[in-house]
Image (cartoon, rainbow, N blue to C red):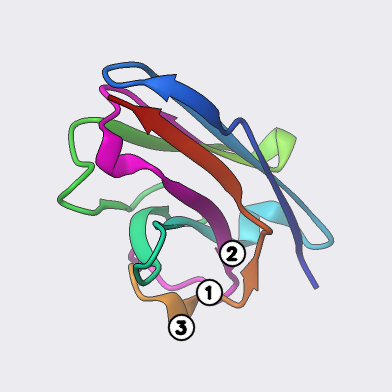
Amino acid sequence: QVQLVESGGGLVQAGGSLRLSCAASGRTFNSLAMGWFRQAPGKEREFVAAITWRGSSIRYADSVKGRFTISRDNAKSTVYLQMDSLKPEDTAVYYCAADPSRFGVARSIESAYDYWGQGTQVTVSS
């Protein structure tokens, strides 16, 4: 089992920045690929970013490419999502997720992720 706890969400003006953190416990963190997803009100959950267990493969959704950066600190069992140049359309609940498969490429499909956090709200005002 893996427990994931997100933090760092909040209210920010358009153009601002936030850094989300996701702390993992219960399993060796450096064996897990990690992903971030988000769900806006009335919409399906969608992929945001992912990083493999070695950090050798990273993937972003087109909508956040160039603005968001995913990273991980295996010593702290934590994955981060640095969000810059935020837009109102980035408003959503952000979830981190863990993929234990050791697949060599960062994956964007929800079904690849076995463990999910509770989510943290990000609200971007215009």
Q: Quadrant of the N terminus?
A: bottom right
Membership of 91 in magenta stretch: yes
Question: For mark 2, what is the residue?
Answer: 98
Q: Label 1 amino acid?
A: Tyr
| Residue that appears at 35% across and 34% down | 69
Residue 7 placement (x, y as % from top left): 66, 37
Over which residues does the magenta segment extend?
81-107
Label 2, label 1: how far apart the Cα atoms are: 5 Å
The secondary element bearing badge 3 is classed as: helix
Residue 54 shows up from this direction: no
Please determine whether, in this image, residue 54 is positioned above or below residue 110: above
Q: Nearer the viewer, residue 87 or 3?
A: 87
Q: Which mark is residue 60?
A: none
Task: Give coordinates of residue 46: x percent, y percent.
Answer: 34, 65
Q: Which residue is mark 3?
A: 111
Q: Which residue is mark 1?
A: 113
Q: Which residue is located at x 18 percent, y 32 percent?
A: 66
- Residue type for callout 2: Ala
- 67, 87: nearer the viewer: 87
Q: Position of residue 96 (x, y in %)?
A: 56, 55
| Nearer-the-camera pick, 110 or 79 | 110
